[in-house]
Image (cartoon, rainbow, N blue to C red):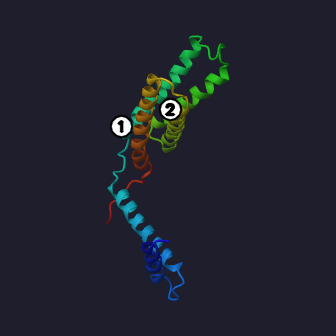
Amino acid sequence: MSDEKVKRKQRGRGRGSAGGAGGGGGAERMARGYARAEERNQAAREALEPLAEGERPTVVTVGAIVAALIALSIVAGYLAGVEVNGEKPKLPQVLAPALIMGIMAWGMWHARYWAVLGFQLILVFLLFSAFFGLVVGASSIGQIAGTLAVLVVAGTFFYFMVKAMARIQMPTREPRE
């Protein structure tokens, strides 16, 4: 062990419990770290503006439109006779995802937390799938560029939805008397 590591360990032990056996210093340090993190979290919460009545964050509106377009495209594809792997999908295979995306579109249009959370879950699956496809399956420049574009768009969308979710979840603040 290097001299610097030994010195750090000894300093950490000295800050601990009265017996100097170590262990206490780490717990105190961790408690201070949690306290600082909670202060930062509280400051972030205070900086958020609650949604006004009927307000919907722009990213949630865009998400609602995207979800509705996906639901419509699923149904339109089925009605147009699109085949998947050489055969027409069965009606439940079409209705389930179309219904889920339609309900999610409605929920996001009405700024419901559960709908935004569900859409983010779909974005996470998309991000992981795209990353896996990039690492394992991308074999041409076009595939790599397309997959990177999906990663950038879905990642950006996900990032901006986090703050929108926090605003949707926030209770309205009552004025202090």
Give how far across and how far down residue 63 sits, in percent: 43, 33
- Residue indicated by mark 1: 58
Q: Which mark is residue 10?
A: none
Give how far across and how far down residue 148 sits, in percent: 43, 31
Disc 2 is placed on an element classified as: helix
Image quadrant in which you'd find residue 8: bottom left
Three-letter residue code for mark 1: Thr
Give how far across and how far down residue 79 sits, in percent: 58, 13
Three-letter residue code for mark 2: Leu
Q: Return the residue found at the far bottom.
A: 19
How many numbered marks, from 0 up? Answer: 2
Q: Nearer the viewer, mark 2 or mark 1?
A: 2
Q: Is residue 28 above or below residue 104?
A: below
Q: CA distance from mark 2 to mark 1?
A: 30 Å
Q: Which mark is residue 134?
A: 2
Disc 1 is placed on an element classified as: helix
Near-viewer residue (70 or 17): 17
Q: Is residue 166 above or below residue 107?
A: below
Question: Image check: 118 left or right of 48?
Answer: right
Please report the residue visible at 65 percent of the width from the left and 13 percent of the height from the top: 86
Give the quadrant of the C terminus. bottom left
Q: Closer to the N terminus: mark 2 or mark 1?
A: 1
Asked if the residues shown at circle 2 and circle 1 are in contact, with their CB atoms under 8 angstroms apart, the answer is no
Few, some or many residues within 10 Å of mark 1 (<14, 14–19, 20+): few
Please report the residue visible at 48 percent of the width from the left and 27 percent of the height from the top: 68
Image quadrant in which you'd find residue 132: top right
Q: Return the residue found at the far front.
A: 2
Few, some or many residues within 10 Å of mark 2 (<14, 14–19, 20+): some
Give how far across and how far down residue 87 sits, in percent: 66, 14
